Image (cartoon, grey):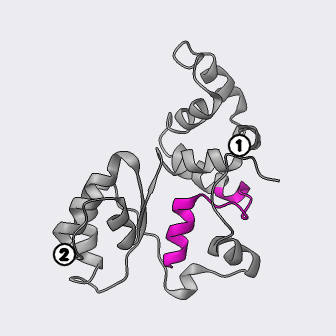
Amino acid sequence: MPPASRQGRPGRQANARDEGLAFADEGVATVPMGGATIIARHLELLGPAGLGLGVAGLCDTGDERYFMRGLVRAGPGPCANRTELRCHGFFVCVADLEDELTRALGADAVARIVDARGDLRSFRLFQNQPAQRERAVERQLRRFMGTHSGRKISYGRYLVDGLDLDYVPAPLDGLLSQL
């Protein structure tokens, strides 16, 4: 039984893993952007005015304004709020994807993943820093993932691999429903 704090519903990701479906075989690609501030350029290149591809994605709460402006600039249509952002296929993660996944998994499961990756000792040292001592473990885990270059990206994959696919976080489930 999932923790009460989990959100989401069984989604396409569960079917993809269960059925061995490869998104690349369906023509779905993940494109690294190099930062949210250049979303308009990616939309111009890939979207209706460029290659004419369907685009969808995730963004962090702090970056949603770049996505809204990028959609207006690139021409798909007006985008003044989250509802319009979702209508264009973009979903906002509360804080970020790692935060969504940590809440879906629960702190204990994320700590086990950190341990399995050989980072538990580093995480315990991090937790003992004065600035971290009063923070909730979920916030500590999220911050820990951002302390080394490349750690957030690699942990994103590990967290998804550890996810109970009956409870996909709502933004990720929304994105997968667009594919």
Crowding near pointer 2: few (<14 within 10 Å), some, many (20+)? some
The disc placed on residue 106 is 1
Report if residue 164 lies within the magenta region.
Answer: yes
User: Is residue 70 visible in the rendered structure shown here?
Assistant: yes
> Which tag, 2 or 1, sits closer to the chain's start?
2
- Where residue 117 appears, x then y in whole percent? 71, 43
Q: Residue at x 49, y 80 (%)?
A: 28
Badge 1 marks a residue whose secondary structure is: loop
Q: Which residue ends up furthest to the left in the rendered image?
A: 73
Separation of residues labelled 2 and 1 (CA atoms): 39 Å
- Number of disc labels: 2
Look at label 1 and name its amino acid.
Answer: Gly
> Which one is nearer the viewer's eye here, 25 or 7?
7
> Which one is nearer the viewer's eye here, 103 or 151?
103
> Which one is nearer the viewer's eye here, 167 or 66?
167
Q: State the extent of the magenta-drawn residues as a range.
A: 160-179
Q: Which image quadrant for residue 15?
A: bottom right
Badge 2 marks a residue whose secondary structure is: loop
Q: In this view, does 6 lie to the left or right of 35?
A: right
Q: Which image quadrant for residue 75?
A: bottom left
Q: Which residue is drawn at 48% across and 47% down?
A: 94
Residue 36, placed above or below residue 14:
above
Q: Name the residue under label 2.
A: 75
- Where residue 32 appears, x then y in whole percent? 40, 63
- Where residue 145 appears, x then y in whole percent? 55, 39
Look at label 2 and name its amino acid.
Answer: Gly
Report if residue 61 lies within the magenta region.
Answer: no
Magenta span: helix, strand or loop, mainly?
A: helix
Q: In this view, does 178 lie to the left or right of 128?
A: left
Q: Residue at x 65, y 27 (%)?
A: 122
User: Is residue 35 visible in the rendered structure shown here?
Assistant: no
- Where residue 37 appears, x then y in whole percent? 26, 54
